[in-house]
Amino acid sequence: MENSFELTEAHTIMLDGMNDELRDAAKHVVGSLGYYVAIQFFMAEFKMAEDKAKILADLGCYVIE
């Protein structure tokens, strides 16, 4: 199955503001917990709104390699 994920402006803005440590952490959280649990984790631990948590999970899952 081909990955059809495309960055939005919101993804690009968040990605540009992330340092290497935050990128690694996002990738690790999504890789360890899975996409949907990572969203809940970001919302609970970082008090993120759901839309921002989804963007961070997207980045950890699809973008950061």
Image (cartoon, rainbow, N blue to C red):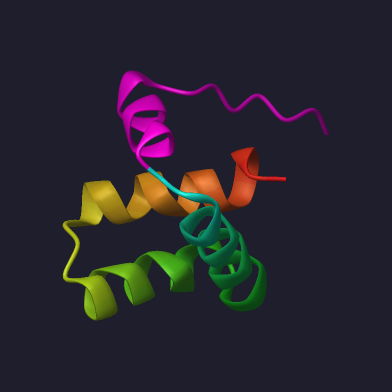
The residue lying at 22 percent from left, 56 percent from top is 50
- Which is more toward the observer, 16 or 7? 16
- Which is more toward the observer, 48 or 1? 48
- Tell me where residue 9 sits by quadrant: top left
Q: Is residue 13 covered in magenta?
A: yes
Report whether 27 appears left or right of 48.
right
Residue 42 screen position, x and y as percent: 33, 69
- Tell me where residue 43 sits by quadrant: bottom left
Report whether 25 appears left or right of 40.
right
In the depicted structure, whether residue 9 falls above or below residue 14: above
In the depicted structure, whether residue 2 falls above or below residue 57: above
The count of marks equals 0
- The residue most toward the right is 1
Report whether 24 appears left or right of 51.
right
Report whether 9 appears left or right of 20.
left
The residue lying at 46 percent from left, 49 percent from top is 19
Residue 18 screen position, x and y as percent: 41, 46
Q: Is residue 6 covered in magenta?
A: yes
Q: Which residues are magenta?
A: 1-17
Residue 5 screen position, x and y as percent: 59, 28
Residue 1 screen position, x and y as percent: 83, 34
In the depicted structure, whether residue 5 falls above or below residue 40: above
Quadrant where the C terminus sits is top right
The residue lying at 62 percent from left, 69 percent from top is 28
The residue lying at 52 percent from left, 61 percent from top is 21
